[in-house]
Amino acid sequence: MKKNKIFTTPDLSRNIDNPLNFATRQRDKDVMQMVRTSLREKNVLLAYQPVVMANGNNKVAFYEGLIRIMDKTGRIIPARDFIEQIENDEMGRIVDCLALEMGLESLAEEPSLRLSINMSARSIGYGRWMETLNHGLKLDPTAGERLILEITESSAMMMPELVTSFMQDLQKMGISFALDDFGAGYTAFRFLKNFYFDIIKIDGQFIRNISTDTDNQVLTKALIAIAEQFDMFTVAECVETAEDHKFLESIGIDCLQGYYFGYPTTAPPWRSPANKKRA
């Protein structure tokens, strides 16, 4: 036996039956079954998180509608716990359709509401998704001007030409688009000027602790400059402290989103007694 082979770490990833791979496959299988059951029984809902103006008064600019499912025990499961497993499956398309449907219902319910809904670029061309949009706009023609569709960097860069064409068609209806998780590392800047996104949401990894992290300060300023060059509105994600809030305002961010301003809630804020009283 050669000496160097004694010290070589075995590549367990090649053994599809190793315990880690088995556990991962079993987890993904369980998640897929949970989502499938929830979709079949329509145990889905939106959680709403405010996005506020960075002008000192924290006025809500719009809400983001975040898809949630309920498991058989009634526990509410956030998208981050299942979206990767279903992204390439038709269930991912169905989730996008249901999120859009519930979002359009909320827009019809509250005429003053502006709402963003997440979608994958994989849902472009999915017949049910477009039918859902057309039906919602037919019921409330004002919904298009108040609807924002969020597409992640990773999703947009899979098929940039298709995304560009899709955006151009829907922007004619008054619909706005946000590039989610901007800066996460996927966007080729040569495509950015062709996308015509209305809003750039800067990824939370650059926002957390920005008041003290000089690297994040430099990177976020650069991302803001890019957005300004292309006349795109900027949103800082994952704002969690007063110090980060203050710093982001000082460097010219347009809007802020994060736990500092409000957690996602499945109880629509515009239905609260306080809002009804003000109305």
Image (cartoon, rainbow, N blue to C red):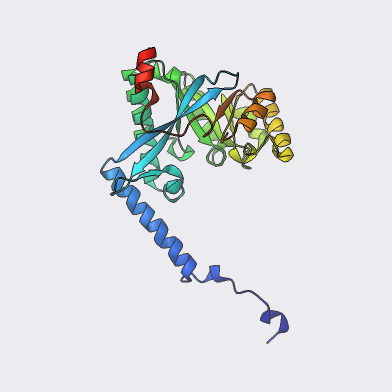
- Residue 45 placement (x, y as % from top left): 34, 36
Q: Residue furthest bottom?
A: 1
- Decide if residue 151 is in sight here: yes
Q: Toward which corner of the image does residue 180 lie, by quadrant?
A: top right
The answer to which of 130 and 272 lies nearer the viewer is 272
- Decide if residue 197 is in sight here: no
Q: Residue furthest top?
A: 279
Can you say whether 28 is above or below 166 in the image?
below
Left-right relation of 34 to 5:
left
Q: Toward which corner of the image does residue 69 lie, by quadrant?
A: top left
Quarter the C terminus occupies = top left
The answer to which of 160 and 78 lies nearer the viewer is 78
The answer to which of 197 and 57 lies nearer the viewer is 57
Q: State the count of labels.
A: 0
Q: Which residue is found at the position 59% from the left and 71% from the top?
A: 11
Q: Residue furthest left?
A: 41
- Residue 1 placement (x, y as % from top left): 68, 87
Q: Which residue is found at the position 65% from the left and 27% from the top?
A: 246
- Residue 169 placement (x, y as % from top left): 48, 24
- Residue 252 placement (x, y as % from top left): 67, 23
Left-right relation of 142 to 161:
left
